[in-house]
Amino acid sequence: MDVKAHVEVYIVFNKEPPEEWMRLPGVRAIKAEELVSIDKKIVLVVGDRELAKQLGVGYLDEEEASELLQYLKRLLGGR
């Protein structure tokens, strides 16, 4: 594996992403219709298990997504 490869983290929502996700550094929060490719991306779909299954990516329910957001905010020092 090439450690110099750039990997992007995408959190995908069926609707407009919550504002809190939009301000999180290092993470792109987008609507599902905006996802063009999953190549070289870590992708987690929120609230749509079927879409996650079709794409072959991770799935989070709303509660898990909220917990991840809080964890990342703490990890990044409350940014």
Image (tube, grey):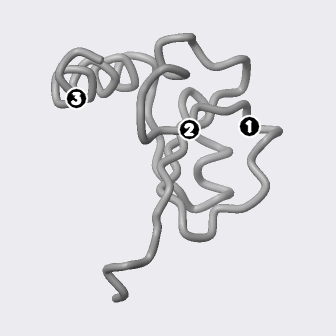
Could you classify mark 1 by the number of other residues whose Cα lies within 10 Å: few (under 14), some (14-19), or many (20 or more)?
A: some
Residue holding disc 2: 28
x and y percentages locating residue 1 in the rendered image:
34, 88
| Label 2 – label 1 distance at C-alpha | 12 Å
Report the residue at 54% width, 44% height from top.
10
x and y percentages locating residue 58 in the rendered image:
46, 50
Report the residue at 44% width, 34% height from top.
60
> If you read the primary sequence from the N terminus, does the residue marked by circle 3 or circle 2 appear first?
2
Report the residue at 56% width, 38% height from top.
28
x and y percentages locating residue 71 in the rendered image:
21, 25
In the image, farthest residue toward the right: 33
Could you classify mark 3 by the number of other residues whose Cα lies within 10 Å: few (under 14), some (14-19), or many (20 or more)?
A: few
Determine the secondary structure under disc 2. strand
Amino acid type at circle 2 is: Arg
Determine the secondary structure under disc 3. loop
Is mark 3 in CB contact (under 8 Å) with mark 2?
Answer: no
Q: Quadrant of residue 78?
A: top left
x and y percentages locating residue 73 in the rendered image:
26, 21
Q: Is residue 45 above or below residue 57?
A: above
Residue holding disc 1: 32
| Label 1 – label 3 distance at C-alpha | 25 Å
| Label 3 – label 2 distance at C-alpha | 15 Å
Residue holding disc 3: 76
Quadrant occupied by the C terminus: top left
